[in-house]
Amino acid sequence: EVQLVESGGGLVQPGRSLRLSCAASGFTFDDYAMHWVRQAPGKGLEWVSGISWNSGSIGYADSVKGRFTISRDNAKNSLYLQMNSLRAEDTALYYCAKDMADDAFDIWGQGTMVTVSS
Amino acid sequence: EIVLTQSPATLSLSPGERATLSCRASQSVSSYLAWYQQKPGQAPRLLIYDASNRATGIPARFSGSGSGTDFTLTISSLEPEDFAVYYCQQRSNSPVTFGQGTRLEIK
């Protein structure tokens, strides 16, 4: 079964850091680009960051550039998001998503919730 | 950044009716447009990619059309499970962007 499982979310104070993980299974992980997409409570979807299959191409939304770092470990079939200098506006459900060969996102995890609050 | 504007914000229809959802891009995205369905408490599900291709397992009542800046998602005859929020997404230019969503509710 093709599956993505996120972990690492939680309650964190403003200015602190958090590292999210996404474990992939059921497909050849290193064949595909991967992404993080977030959804603030009651709001729409916002792309956060994406990484190519070999980490050679990486992109970030302006809202997180310089604070978040995406990475992957193909040997571990895992995707990561290091989030530094967290702000209240980063509060959201963070989804990991598989890229359908530079096209749409065909597989999504169930998300991990990040709450930034003092 | 390409802005995607979805209309209407909310669509109220009855089961069996036809639903037409619109997505307009601020500049051409060619055919690099996808549609997703999201139900409460669930992750988004890919319905349509490349403007008109149904994703694996998606029923034939869902269809997509359009190119350039104007796109449409059509649900030919609404089933009870189709009432949800629908998002469009473009991959033509970085950054990836999503529309604000259309809520399809039962009338």
Image (cartoon, coloured by chain):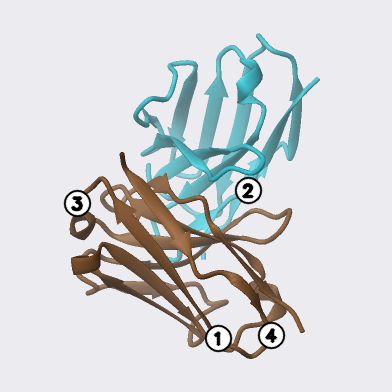
Chain colours: A brown, B cyan
For the point 35% across and 52% down, the residue is A98
For the point 26% across and 62% down, the residue is A77
Residue A73's image quarter? Answer: bottom left
The span from disc 4 to disc 2 (Cα, nearest Å) is: 34 Å
The span from disc 3 to disc 1 (Cα, nearest Å) is: 30 Å
B88 and A107: which one is in front?
A107
Q: Crowdedness of circle 2 by 10 Å Cα count: few (<14), some, many (20+)?
A: many
Does A40 sit above or below residue B80? Answer: below
B55 and A26: which one is in front?
A26
| Residue B11, x across and y down, in percent | 74, 29
Q: Crowdedness of circle 1 by 10 Å Cα count: few (<14), some, many (20+)?
A: some
The residue labelled by disc 1 is A17
Does B56 sit above or below residue A22? Answer: above
Apparent side of residue A49 relative to residue A100 in the rendered image (left or right): right
Q: Crowdedness of circle 3 by 10 Å Cα count: few (<14), some, many (20+)?
A: few
Q: Crowdedness of circle 4 by 10 Å Cα count: few (<14), some, many (20+)?
A: some
The residue labelled by disc 4 is A13
Q: State yes or no: discs 4 and 3 in contact (Cβ < 8 Å).
A: no
The span from disc 4 to disc 1 (Cα, nearest Å) is: 8 Å
Which numbered circle lies on residue B5? 2
Could you tell which of marks 3 and 1 lies nearer the N-terminus? 1
The span from disc 4 to disc 3 (Cα, nearest Å) is: 36 Å
